[in-house]
Image (cartoon, rainbow, N blue to C red):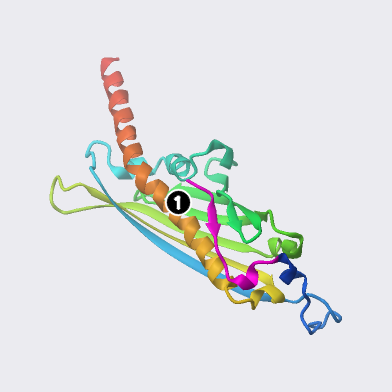
Amino acid sequence: MQRGTLAASPALASPALLRRRPRTGCGRGFGALCSVERSYSCSRSLTLPLRDDSRWPVEGYLRHTERVVLLSFPDQARRQRLSADTWRVRLLPFQLLWFTLRVACSLRTWADEAGALHVCGREMTLSGLPAELQELASTVVLRVDGQLLSTRAAAAGSGATMQGAVRLRIAAKVPEVVAFVPGVDGLVQRVLEQILYRIEASLRTSLPLDYSAWTREQQAKAAQQEQT
């Protein structure tokens, strides 16, 4: 997948804009740079028909949560396993305005008793911000909540459908001189949408193939056990 490039309002095109100071000191002395609370959210759903193998159903596959993480972040350099169920992952860089933004976060994955896979993302870090926006990096709060499960039609042999949903929310204290520039909110929203689109596109392409590979692995293991 290619690095994203997002266009913005002409008002955002120059770093000189960020060096301006608001007219009021917001109680911290004249010329102090004020911040404004901002929050954004984005959600996306996935519906993916599968040829379900009754001997090794999708619910069993989803219990191998590591496989779904590897599909979502196929580049080994962009993921690090922190524990049995927690990963540190880095998204592909975003070209924003005149700088390149790099985003990382911690993901926890687990499967419940019904075989549904859950994802929880926290601890977001930003790098590549210009000096004028460095304060923003320490105020960002991330929440990612997702679920992936299998639903099976009543008719025998009709297969299964993989259904997923994810919601991404961020909140931050944005410098006032940036927060009220036309186009900023739309730019942030497009970043969130592109993050979810990249993950969905990767799963849509790779997940059915990986499920088929997993069923073949189970078949080979079962055959080997029968021979022994």
- The magenta segment: 1-14
The spot of residue 209 in percent (x, y) is: 33, 38
The spot of residue 11 in percent (x, y) is: 63, 73
Residue projecting furthest to the top: 228
Q: Is residue 47 above or below residue 20?
A: above
34 within the magenta span: no
Q: Is residue 119 above or below residue 44?
A: above
Callout 1 crowding tier (Cα within 10 Å): few <14, some 14–19, many ≥20: some
Residue 221 visible, this angle: yes
The spot of residue 201 in percent (x, y) is: 40, 50
8 within the magenta span: yes
Residue 80 visible, this angle: no
Identify residue for label 1: 199
The spot of residue 172 in percent (x, y) is: 64, 68
Relative placement, left or right, of 10 versus 192 is: right
> Which residue is painted at 27% across and 41% down in the image?
57
Q: Which secondary structure lies at badge 1?
A: helix
> Which residue is painted at 47% across and 44% down in the image?
69
Using the image as rendered, state which of residue 30 and residue 221 is in the foreground. Answer: 30
Three-letter residue code for mark 1 = Ile
Relative placement, left or right, of 150 versus 100 is: left
Residue projecting furthest to the right: 29
